Amino acid sequence: MSDAVAPGKIAADIVAPPRAYRPGVVRRFVRHRLAVLGVVLIALLGIASVAAPYLAPYDPDEIDIGARYAPPLAENHLLGSDDLGRDVTTRLMYAGRISLSVGVAAMLVTLVVGFAIGAFAAYLGGWVDTVLMRLTDVMLCFPSVFLLLFVAAFVAPSLTSMALMIGLTCWMEIARIVHAQILTLKQADFIAAAEMAGAPAWRIVLRQILPNSLAPILVAATLNTANAILLESYISFLGYGIQPPQASWGNMLTNAQSDFQVDPWLAVFPGLAITLAVASFNFIGDGLRDALDPRLRRR
Amino acid sequence: MRRYVAARLGQAAVLLLGVSVIGFALMHLAPGGPLALYTLNPTVTAQDIERVKHLFGLDQPVYVQYVKWVYGFLSGHWGYSFFGGRSVAPIVLERIPATLELMGSSLLLALAMGVAIGIWAAVRRNTLVDYGTATVAMLALSLPTFWFGLLAIYVFAQVLGWLPAGGIETTGNGSLIDRLTHLLLPMLVLALVLTAQWSRYTRSAMIDILTQDYIRTARAKGLGPVRVLVGHGLRAALVPLVTLAGLQLPLLVGGALVTETVFSWPGMGLLFISALDNRDYPVLMAILMVGALFVVLGNLAADIAVALIDPRIRLSHV
């Protein structure tokens, strides 16, 4: 009975990525100090946003006309208060909920749409391939800000619509990566070897194709999150995105031009929050690139 | 070579046709159609809407409108603005020089700085210089351009008072110096992101090249470091860098839009925002097309330049 293998062991063996792939990923990622800093910062921003109702000192819409334009480090307002006396710390935390959600949700949309289009084109080939990949080329001709504003002007702004719009204008890179990956992998020797060894299709997909195409997709997805946060801030800054009184980091800067005259700090903190979040995701993407794919690693 | 250029021209035309279809479809997908904003206005009667619809040809089937629009666009009649009724072509075309001035100067500045920083980082690979420039570049890529522009205006125009806060020139004073001082701040803000990208691409391209055998040969035969880097290294890096210049165009055009709105720079971006506020679809559509035209022609120029530089590429396509 010593030959018998527990069923759980087989399942674990199938689910686990190829052995050569896993070791060192975490170690290589941790060596990228800025990526680690990015993870810490995103975690902090995430916690502050998610737990805003419990952590925030005020209600985000609580108006206190007596305490307008309080400077940072003022008695009751750590980062000061805005033109209506609302607490800036509180509003930044609630705005983070919106801005980070839009960033992550838009990234998920780019993943789904990009993967679907790239995979369909590569698998089906023929005219489907031609049409879908030409569509990708056409979408890449639009400067994304133009296209996004064009659509944002007549869509009722909300978290969902913002995420959809940004996602639907930024999926092209993922589609191209998935397309190229699948085309290359279809011809790779180790796939043919796995087929000849009698591995079922699902096993090839799970153990050969997925681990080998995951790295560039994951990196692109991380960078897409950063880009989506930037785009959301710009659309909301111009007034076509998240509408006040609901706060987003972008719409907190809508009055930045006049805020600079009255109370420059009001215009500084939301911009810093955007920069921190975007830089963190960018650094994480950089670290993931180094960690996941030694072939792409910077020399 | 001629066949290669012809094939790429054909592809560019197909791309632009695709852009126009998507733009036109979006315009008509707008709830209530392109005139939605006016139906909400109580002073505009239903008869007015019908009259305007007829006037602009909006009562015809969409495909008829599209064919007419394409024909008009190709023959230089870009329709009439919903707002003010002027012909669209001159409204948009008169804004192009300002946008080109901003984009062109930023691109040149970014090119010079980015390539220099990239070579520096590649030569000092894995040193403090390399890590430092990489970190600064990543931070620059993460700054929201509009916020950084406003910050720059606050510091350099308001606090220090060295530079004007916006516009392309002081009214009544269009001297070269005056125009240059107006250009400086938006140019630097727009160039920042581009420089960051250029420096990173130049670095990785140069590192690929500097490990090649012929570079070692050049060094071994006693060439000075400048001649090795520029004559042998940069020359070989030209192909990926020219391709990047083409790929960067959507970023450049989009960045110009953002920068123009912050600095009240009277180019296409500022026009786009005001047309957006008025839901002036004929103008929006024209700007979308001109923006895409910039991108497509830029890519085409980059592809042709690459084919001219690198015979392998032009021969592989014959």
Image: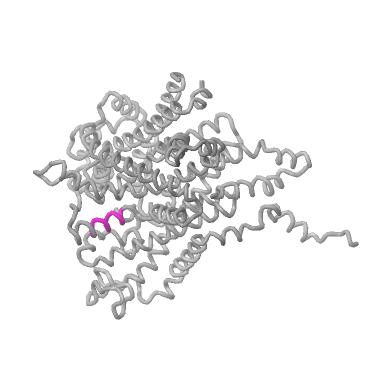
Q: Residue at x 37, y 47 (%)?
A: B195
Q: Residue furthest front?
A: B222
Q: Residue at x 38, y 52 (%)?
A: A231
Depicted A30 relative to depicted A143: above or below: below
Q: Residue at x 43, y 21 (%)?
A: B6
Q: Position of residue A42 (x, y in %)?
A: 47, 64
Q: Position of residue B288 (x, y in %)?
A: 33, 37
Which one is nearer the viewer's eye here, B146 or B308? B308
Which one is nearer the viewer's eye here, B131 or A103? B131
Please tell me in which quadrant of the rendered image residue B174 appears: top left
Q: Residue at x 22, y 38 (%)?
A: B82
Q: Position of residue A243 (x, y in %)?
A: 32, 59
Please tell me in which quadrant of the rendered image residue B5 appears: top left
Which one is nearer the viewer's eye here, A164 or A80? A80
Residue A138 appears in the picture as rendered: no
Q: Residue furthest right?
A: A1
Residue B255 appears in the picture as rendered: yes
Please tell me in which quadrant of the rendered image residue B244 appears: top left
**In magenta segment, residue B8:** no
Q: Which residues are magenta?
A: B146-154
Q: Quadrant of the N terminus of chain A?
A: bottom right
Asked whether, in this view, residue A241 is left or right of residue B87, the answer is right
Asked whether, in this view, residue B172 is left or right of residue B231, the answer is left
